[in-house]
Amino acid sequence: MKQFHVYIMASRNGVLYVGMTNDLERRVGQHKTQSVPGFTSRYRVERLVFFEAFPTALQAIAAEKRIKGWRREKEIKLIESLNPTWRDLSEDWVEPDPPRHSNDRHPEGSGSDPRDLGRE
């Protein structure tokens, strides 16, 4: 069953970002590797400090909008109610693959013959 998540990322100096996704691990990996230009890469927002799952996209979007409408103090209370030490909740996850270029069709060491690249 597909789940949707609302999440909060934080930088080391306290910048917060609220987002919504249908693939939390992928999206957190994008934030950590700064593979998507924008607010989170500019402010180095790389630690997952809160997330909540929802059964539908509409519920997750509504929760995201609700949290984004809060004052910072209320966002902090939400985080600290479940994660008082602001631990990176993704620290035990497998490290994301580094971003690959579109022309990198085979990872190094895969045993693929480079002469076969045009035959896929």
Image (cartoon, rainbow, N blue to C red):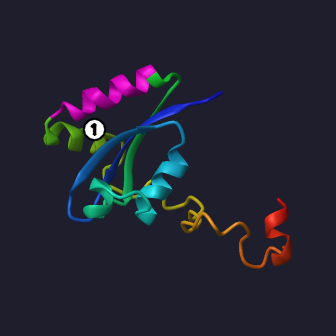
Position above or below: 113 against 2: below
Residue 14 point in image, percent of width and height: 21, 58
Residue 92 point in image, percent of width and height: 54, 60
Q: Is residue 101 visible?
A: yes
Position above or below: 34 against 19: below
Which residue in the protein does label 1 denote? 78
For the image, the number of numbered tags is: 1
**Residue at 22 percent of width and 40 percent of height:** 75
Tell whether position 61 is magenta.
yes
Which SS does the magenta portion mostly show?
helix
Q: Is residue 111 visible?
A: no
Position above or below: 81 against 86: above
Residue 104 point in image, percent of width and height: 66, 69
Q: Amino acid at mark 1?
A: Leu
Tell whether position 63 is magenta.
yes
Residue density around tag 1, few if under 14, some if 14–19, many if 20 or more, within 10 Å = some
Q: Is residue 80 left or right of residue 109?
A: left
- Which residue is more in the foreground, 55 or 83? 55
Q: Where does the magenta region start and end?
A: 58-70
As helix, strand or loop, the secondary structure at mark 1 comes to helix
Residue 97 point in image, percent of width and height: 59, 65
Q: Quadrant of residue 47?
A: bottom left
